[in-house]
Amino acid sequence: MVAYLEYDLFGLASHQSVARSINHNIAIGGEIIVPNSQWTHQKEQISNLLYGKTNTILFTSPGEGIKYKVKNLKIVFEKEKIRLYQLARYYPEINCISKEVILIH
């Protein structure tokens, strides 16, 4: 499964402008600040940062005077999709007619 952090963001252009820490890891984002005055939907993969059932997400200000709002925060799990041409590197017997394969874990 692949996990995504999804939320609506106001005040900054994308999740790359938002400083955030997941499960007390070093904060990511916030290096390049791009203001925005509209709500935009954000989706970022966080599979490798999650622990079991309880996870902590901390949003912080990337700099003094930088303000933004977050709403509709959720973690979404999706089945992992791998394109056939990626699998063909490891499994040459795969016929690349279809566009993608869903791996069942």
Image (cartoon, rainbow, N blue to C red):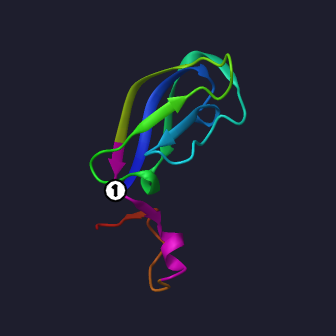
Q: Nearer the viewer, residue 27 or 41?
A: 27
Instruction: Kindly identify the residue that appears in the image at 53 percent across and 71 percent down.
Output: 86
Rendered position, 45 above or below 42: below
Q: Nearer the viewer, residue 58 or 104?
A: 58
| Image: 13 above or below 45 | above
The residue drawn where x is 55% and y is 29% is 60
Relative to residue 54, is residue 87 drawn left or right?
right
Position of 88 compared to 104: left or right?
right
Q: Tell me the magenta residue range.
A: 76-90
Q: Compared to 16, does 83 lie above or below?
A: below
| Location of residue 89 in the rendering, given as x and y in whole percent from the top left corner | 55, 80
Which element carries disc 1, helix, strand or loop? loop
The percent coordinates of residue 28 (x first, y second) are 59, 43
Q: Is residue 19 magenta?
A: no
Task: Tell me the kind of residue under disc 1.
Answer: Lys
- Assign the N terminus to one quadrant of the image: bottom left
* Quarter of the figure with residue 33: top right
> How dense is the environment of label 1, judged by Cα within 10 Å: few (below 14), some, or many (20 and up)?
few
Report the number of discs.
1
Residue holding disc 1: 79
Residue 78 x %, y %: 35, 51
Q: Quadrant of the C terminus?
A: bottom left
- Which residue reaches farthest top? 37
- Horizontally, is 15 left or right of 52 in the view? right
- In terms of depth relative to the viewer, which is nearer, 4 or 86? 4
Seen at 48% across and 75% down, the residue is 87
